[in-house]
Image (spheres, rainbow, N blue to C red):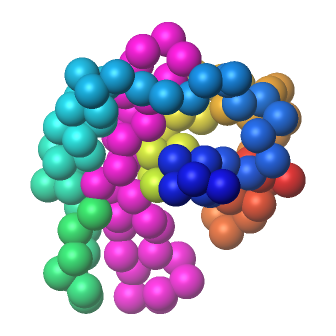
Amino acid sequence: MSSRDSGRGNGADAPSDPSITSDELDRLIEHADRAKARAYAPYSNFRVGAALLTETGDVIAGCNVENSSYGMSMCAERSAIYRVRFAFDNLCTGGRELAAGECLVGSLVS
């Protein structure tokens, strides 16, 4: 498994060629950098941005949000996934309902 393939769940709905162009990669990095500026990280001071590229070419970004209750903090990747859910409704879920909070990631990859 290459590093590009890691973290994609079971891949049942993945496109056959998930590669992206260098222009798309540059756009993703730019959006992730902008999202990083919106991060709320008063405890770690470690700001993170993430960006997702949809099949339609849209870029959705998210940032980490820390909470004094460590378990309720949100990583940048999860933040971006939440934004996809609300921006594009069933794009990533295949029509399944998403669970709230900590169950979200498990719902997407199961």
* Towards the viewer: 6 or 75: 6
- Say if 25 sits above or below 72 in the image: above
Image coordinates of residue 11 in percent, x first then y, are: 76, 40
> In the drawing, does residue 15 fall left or right of residue 62?
right
* Image-quadrant location for residue 17: top right
Q: Which residue is drawn at 39% across and 88% down?
A: 68
Q: Is residue 99 visible?
A: no
Farthest residue, direction front: 1
Residue 73 counted in the magenta span? yes
> In the drawing, does residue 103 fall left or right of residue 56?
right
Image coordinates of residue 65 in percent, x first then y, are: 35, 67
- Say if 110 sits above or below 83 in the image: below
Residue 58 counted in the magenta span? yes
Farthest residue, direction top: 56
Q: Residue at x 46, y 75 (%)?
A: 73
Q: Which residue is drawn at 36% across and 75% down?
A: 66
Q: Is residue 7 visible?
A: yes
* Towards the viewer: 100 or 84: 84
> In the drawing, does residue 102 fall left or right of residue 79?
right
Image coordinates of residue 89 in percent, x first then y, are: 64, 25
Q: Residue at x 83, y 35 (%)?
A: 12
* Image-quadrant location for residue 23: top left
Q: Give the range drawn in magenta.
A: 49-76
> In the drawing, does residue 5 fall left or right of residue 74?
right
- Say if 17 sits above or below 103 in the image: above
Q: Count all numbered tags in the image, as a single digit.
A: 0
Image coordinates of residue 47 in percent, x first then y, are: 22, 68
Q: Quadrant of the N terminus?
A: bottom right
